[in-house]
């Protein structure tokens, strides 16, 4: 099999795997519209559910960044998908705040290594000159998974209840893990890496870099701060936008769920487009155009407080699709 065909197949499988993780993490934001009433949770407890899901996710990525290098990216990805699926099933069976927190903790722990594993595989399979485009394209898995996960969760919430919202994504994650096992063979030292000119390079999935040395690289700390701010906005939208639309704009749970998917649709188009533009015209200074786009997204998002009461048509066509789509790169 030639290199380009192998790259396409491998990329597609990794895209599918990472997409499935967002099917697992998106239901929480959707079920909040009824979870408080079903389990008798107040607003503070609903907020702690977010902490339970995100804090272990961040802690594992920061504290154990080399899991994929140590155990193999493909093996790590498969095991974590199954583990997250089991935790998601447990979430559907709980009947109290404490047990739901425990289930979300384990879900966050298993989801954390998935992105580092995907990144390691992609950076190994593609030359650095293509990374802006490749990672911009893989980012569409985030928004496609968010879009599909939100739509599925909204439909299940409306017709089957909140517990079924956690079951369907779990089944999908298990199926993807099995699919990866059957289609993508375990590879370690024999993964082919190519240079920008198409020349094959020797490579392995290992890494000799440690965390302190990486932090010392110029601009890494600044990028970390930048990503923290972006993630702060993204997860706020993921976790609280449906509830905001229900409580403050008086949308139905079904309307709020499907309206919030437009946030992901904007990202599906914006992310690969920016990747192409950066590779073609700003390959030597990518942060300048990214900074401009980020600032535009932040300013327009701030205006959402004013324009959110202008009606569903305006919110759908402008506020979510245009505004929030740009901030997600």
Image: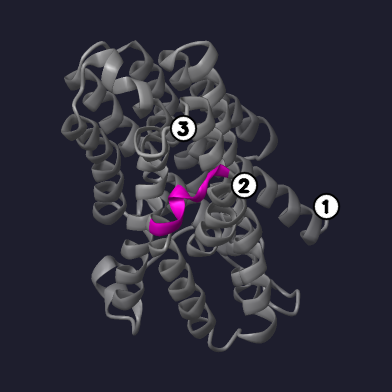
Are circles 3 and 1 on residues that touch, CB within 8 Å?
Answer: no
Quarter residue 17 falls in: top right
Determine the CA span between mark 2 and mark 3. 33 Å
Q: Nearer the viewer, mark 2 or mark 1?
A: 2
Q: Which residues are magenta?
A: 306-312
Residue occupied by mark 3: 251
The label number, if any, that marks residue 31 in the structure image? none
Quarter residue 7 falls in: bottom right
The label number, if any, that marks residue 1 in the structure image? 1
Q: Give yes or no for residue 4 being in the magenta stretch.
A: no
Q: Please tell me which residue lies in front, 311 or 185.
A: 311
Task: Name the residue: 73% across, 75% down.
Answer: 199
For numbered disc 1, what is the local secondary structure?
loop
For numbered disc 2, what is the local secondary structure?
helix
Q: Please tell me which residue lies in front, 32 or 175.
A: 32
Q: Is residue 51 above or below residue 105?
A: below
For numbered disc 3, what is the local secondary structure?
loop
Pinpoint residue 29: horizontal percent, then vertical percent: 39, 34
Quarter residue 121 falls in: bottom right
Determine the CA span between mark 2 and mark 1. 20 Å
Res. 42 visible in picture: yes
Residue occupied by mark 2: 15
Report the predominant secondary structure element of the magenta stretch: helix
Closer to the N terminus: mark 3 or mark 1?
A: 1
């Amino acid at each position: 099999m030639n290199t380009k065909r192998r790259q396409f197949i491998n990329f597609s499988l990794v895209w599918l795997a990472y997409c499935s993780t967002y099917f697992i993490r998106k239901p929480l934001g959707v079920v909040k519209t009824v979870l408080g009433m079903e389990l008798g949770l107040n607003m503070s407890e609903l907020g702690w559910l977010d902490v339970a899901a995100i804090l272990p996710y961040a802690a594992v990525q920061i504290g154990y960044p080399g899991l994929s290098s140590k155990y193999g990216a493909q093996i790590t990805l498969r095991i974590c998908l199954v583990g997250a699926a089991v935790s998601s099933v447990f979430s559907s069976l709980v009947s109290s705040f404490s047990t739901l927190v425990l289930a979300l903790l384990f879900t966050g722990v298993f989801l954390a290594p998935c992105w580092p594993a995907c990144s390691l595989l992609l950076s190994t399979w593609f030359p650095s000159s293509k990374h802006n485009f490749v990672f911009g394209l893989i980012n569409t898995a985030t928004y496609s998974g968010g879009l599909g996960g939100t739509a599925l969760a909204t439909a299940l919430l409306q017709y089957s209840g909140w517990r079924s919202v956690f079951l369907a994504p779990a089944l999908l994650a298990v199926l993807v893990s099995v699919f990866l096992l059957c289609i993508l063979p375990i590879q370690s030292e024999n993964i082919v890496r190519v240079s920008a000119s198409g020349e094959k390079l020797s490579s392995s999935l290992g890494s000799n870099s440690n965390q302190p040395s990486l932090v010392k690289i110029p601009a890494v700390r600044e990028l970390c701060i930048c990503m923290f701010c972006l993630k702060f906005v993204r997860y706020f939208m993921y976790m609280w936008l449906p509830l905001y639309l229900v409580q403050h704009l008086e949308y139905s749970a079904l309307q709020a769920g499907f309206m919030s998917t437009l946030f992901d649709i904007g990202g599906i188009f914006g992310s690969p487009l920016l990747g192409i533009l950066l590779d073609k015209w700003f390959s030597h200074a990518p942060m300048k155009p990214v900074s401009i786009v980020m600032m535009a997204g932040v300013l327009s998002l701030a205006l959402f407080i004013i324009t959110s009461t202008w009606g569903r048509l305006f919110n759908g066509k402008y506020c979510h699709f245009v505004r929030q789509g740009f901030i997600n790169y």
